[in-house]
Amino acid sequence: MKDLQTIREHAALYLIWSNRVLSRGRISDILSLKPPTVSALIHDLINSGRVREGRLADSSGGRRAKLLEIVPTWGWVIGLEFSSRGIVSACARMNGDIYNIKQSNIESGAGRDKILKSLSAAIRYQINNIRKIDLAPIFRIGVAISGLVDEKTGISINFPRLEDWKDVPLKQIFEQEFGVRTVVENRITAITCAEHLFGEHKDLKDVLIFQMGPGLGMGIILNGQVRRGVKWSVGEFGHIAFSSDNGPLCYCGKRGCLESVASDYALVAQAKDAIKDGVNTRILDFAGSKDNITAEAICHAAEDGDRLAYNMLERVGYFLAMGVANLLNVLGPEAVLFGGSMIEPNDVLLDCIQRNLRVYTLEYIEKHVKVAKATFGSNQGIQGAITIALNDCYTKPQAGNSIG
């Protein structure tokens, strides 16, 4: 059985990390411990080099308390994001400060083995970069990946539009190769964890987080908890049916999935078809060539007044709002947040979605739901990967191995 003092130290460490800064008094209140007990805990954490005293708390009358914070330099974690847009890796200190974000593209047509080599190379790059700085232990690798994930076993069950990516044991592969405990989560779930702990709306208890990119995903926070499926990750928003058998064929094998008409991929395909048919548009002015058309280029063209680009976003916004409105009417959350490649460039698509939400969401729900962009912008995936790595460090400190 774990020593009670150790359990309390770990609980205090988690609270300080997840709140960024925290006073002894607040720790005492949350853990229901007497002030002398907390003082002894913090004394040991400071002496171990994991916690330090920072700035003074804002005054509410009386003596100002010293706020506690994590010492960043006692260890590292590595984050790895793998999505349809490529691989992103980074390293982070124990307080969550992120360094050395590196993006790598995946070659068109690359299969499982080649991608696994690229993922391992991205991790190795971060390890080598860390060792140029210091020899502090590397405690975790956090992997945020698109597709279905069994987060208990660390198996990536599938990956969108990658046929030979089935039941890939990423946790086992990386732990054997690098000797570091590895945590694997669905990308949108990892992003949701980051929003829940550190986002601008972290104090809200019921939030839906939508990712509008090559895929359409949804993260769910209900009653202050990030929701996961019984076995696999939840939030496959893109596979909500918007029509019956006459809808477009989705890569999942069904017809009429929302993702087949309202994703980044669908938007780009629609633009290419329109240009091929001779529709007048300035989208190529922003993309450079037909092969380089992206959702970002379409969003910028729409903002510049291009009629085709705007009309396509209006149509996509209608379909997305219909799906979101159905969920708002069922769940009635406090806030709904939007991120992804179709949202980040500007507010054109978000404005289209909001207009349609006012029409299709029940009035008494719509009035009380905050609609906003997600917190971390284009870095949200790697922020999620780092967050799940650190969260595992602070909630399961005795689990797994580290290198250093």
Image (cartoon, helix red, strand yellow):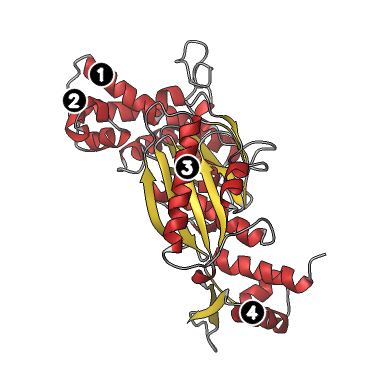
Q: Tell me the distance, in whole angstroms, between the alpha carbons under discs 2 and 4.
A: 63 Å
Mark 1 to mark 3 CA distance (whole Å): 36 Å
On screen, residue 5 above or below 200? below
Q: Nearer the viewer, residue 393 or 66?
A: 393
Q: Say the numbered circle drawn on residue 274.
A: 1
Three-letter amino acid code of the residue under disc 1 = Ala
Q: CA distance from mark 4 to mark 3?
A: 39 Å
Residue 65, horizontal then vertical, whole percent: 55, 83
How far apart marks 3 and 2 lie (CA) works out to 38 Å
Lower sequence index among marks 1 and 3: 3
Circle 4 crowding by C-alpha within 10 Å: few under 14, some 14–19, many from 20: many
Are discs 1 and 2 less than 8 Å apart at CB?
A: yes
Q: Position of residue 253 (x, y in %)?
A: 53, 17
Report crowding for label 3: few under 14, some 14 to 19, many 20 or more residues within 10 A (C-alpha).
many
In the rendered structure, the answer to whether residue 305 lies left or right of residue 30 reads: left
Q: Residue at x 26, y 35 (%)?
A: 297
**Mark 3 highlights which residue?**
119
Camera-side mark, 2 or 4: 4
The answer to which of marks 3 and 2 sits earlier in the sequence is 3
Looking at the image, is mark 1 or mark 4 earlier in the sequence? 4
> Is 14 or 210 nearer to us in this picture?
14
In the depicted view, which residue is nearer to us: 340 or 358? 340
> In this rendering, which labeled residue sits more in front, label 3 or label 2?
3
Spot occupied by residue 86 in the image (x, y as percentages of width and height): 40, 38
Give the residue type that dot 4 points to.
Ile
Q: Are marks 4 and 3 in contact (CB under 8 Å)?
A: no
